[in-house]
Image: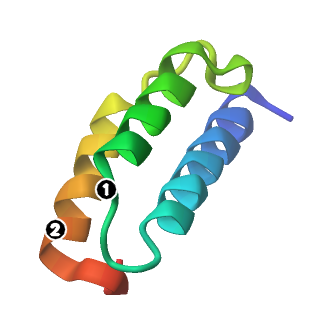
């Protein structure tokens, strides 16, 4: 896999994890903390900052609910 493909796959995994946690239209603060931990110290996400992605996902969830 090229570095661009790897980063795209990492982002897809991160978004998928978020959507699984938010599938009921709500995400608990503890789940948000877990997502932040995964981004900061998870071995697979090392070297990529997904904090902006998380902020965007949280904003979308607040606006669109389960339709995200």
Residue beneath disc 2: 62
Mark 1 or mark 2, whichever is nearer to me? 2
**What x and y, as percent, mark residue 47?**
58, 13
**Residue sitting at x 48%, y 56%:** 18
Mark 1 surroundings within 10 Å by alpha-carbon count, few (fewer than 14), some (14 through 19), many (20 or more): some
Could you say which disc has been placed on residue 4 in the image? none
Label 1 element class: helix
**What sort of colour scheme is used for the picture?**
rainbow
Q: How many tags in the picture?
A: 2
Q: Residue furthest bottom?
A: 67
**Residue sitting at x 34%, y 60%:** 27
* Residue 63 shown left or right of residue 55 in the figure: left
**Residue sitting at x 33%, y 30%:** 51
Q: Quadrant of the C terminus?
A: bottom left
**What x and y, as percent, mark residue 12?**
61, 53
Q: Nearer the viewer, residue 28 or 46?
A: 28
**What x and y, as percent, mark residue 63?**
13, 74
Mark 2 surroundings within 10 Å by alpha-carbon count, few (fewer than 14), some (14 through 19), many (20 or more): some
Q: Quadrant of the N terminus?
A: top right
**What x and y, as percent, mark residue 59?**
17, 58
Residue beneath disc 1: 57
Marks 1/2: CA distance?
A: 9 Å
């Amino acid at each position: 896999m090229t570095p661009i493909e790897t980063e795209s796959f990492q982002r897809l995994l991160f978004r998928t994890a978020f959507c699984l946690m938010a599938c009921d239209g709500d995400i608990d603060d503890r789940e948000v903390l877990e997502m932040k931990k995964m981004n900061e110290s998870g071995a697979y996400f090392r070297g990529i900052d997904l904090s902006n992605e998380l902020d965007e996902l949280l904003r979308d969830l607040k606006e669109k609910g389960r339709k995200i």
